[in-house]
Image: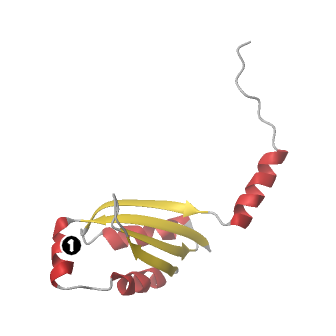
């Protein structure tokens, strides 16, 4: 399965609700991801532009997209960014393929 990293920022209203009633959001995320055929790897909270980082597996990009769309559809997230992650082995294979390819750079002639 492919790996994905989703970074998300909660709305002020979501934070207000969770500070009054703390919740382990990783439980619901794991259930959602599994329901759609994936697996939660880890979920962290952080400082900065994004409030949380979730790493999960999904069988394909369409499923990963469905997971993210379902997760944010309740309206408690104001910003989301998902990145497809490559394993070291996948990257090594990409480097091998690129090493066999030939591409002509632009020239001034």
* Residue found at x 15% / y 82%: 20
Give neighbour class at mark 1: few <14, some 14-19, many 20+ (Cα, 10 Å): some
User: Which residue carries the number 1 mark?
Assistant: 15
Q: Secondary structure at mark 1?
A: helix
**Residue closer to the observer: 69 or 80:** 80
* Residue found at x 41% / y 64%: 7
* Residue found at x 21% / y 79%: 18
Identify whether 56 is placed above or below 24. above
Residue sticking out furthest to the front: 47
**Residue closer to the observer: 69 or 14:** 14
Q: Quadrant of the C terminus?
A: top right
Residue 106 position, x and y percent, is 70, 24
**Residue closer to the observer: 84 or 65:** 84
Q: Quadrant of the N terminus?
A: bottom right
Identify whether 103 is placed above or below 109. below
Residue 87 position, x and y percent, is 66, 66
Left or right: 88, with 31 as reference point: right
Residue 59 position, x and y percent, is 58, 73
* Residue found at x 27% / y 85%: 23
Count of labels in the image:
1
Identify whether 70 is placed above or below 80. below
């Amino acid at each position: 399965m492919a790996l994905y990293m989703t970074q998300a920022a909660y709305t002020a209203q979501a934070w207000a609700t969770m500070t009054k009633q703390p919740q382990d959001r990783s439980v619901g995320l794991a259930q959602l991801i599994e329901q759609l055929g994936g697996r939660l790897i880890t979920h962290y909270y952080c400082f900065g532009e994004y409030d949380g980082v979730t790493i999960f597996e999904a069988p394909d990009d369409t499923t990963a997209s469905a997971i993210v769309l379902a997760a944010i559809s309740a309206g408690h997230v104001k910003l989301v960014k998902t990145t497809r992650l490559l394993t070291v082995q996948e990257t090594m294979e990409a480097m091998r393929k690129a090493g066999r390819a030939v591409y002509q750079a632009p020239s001034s002639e």
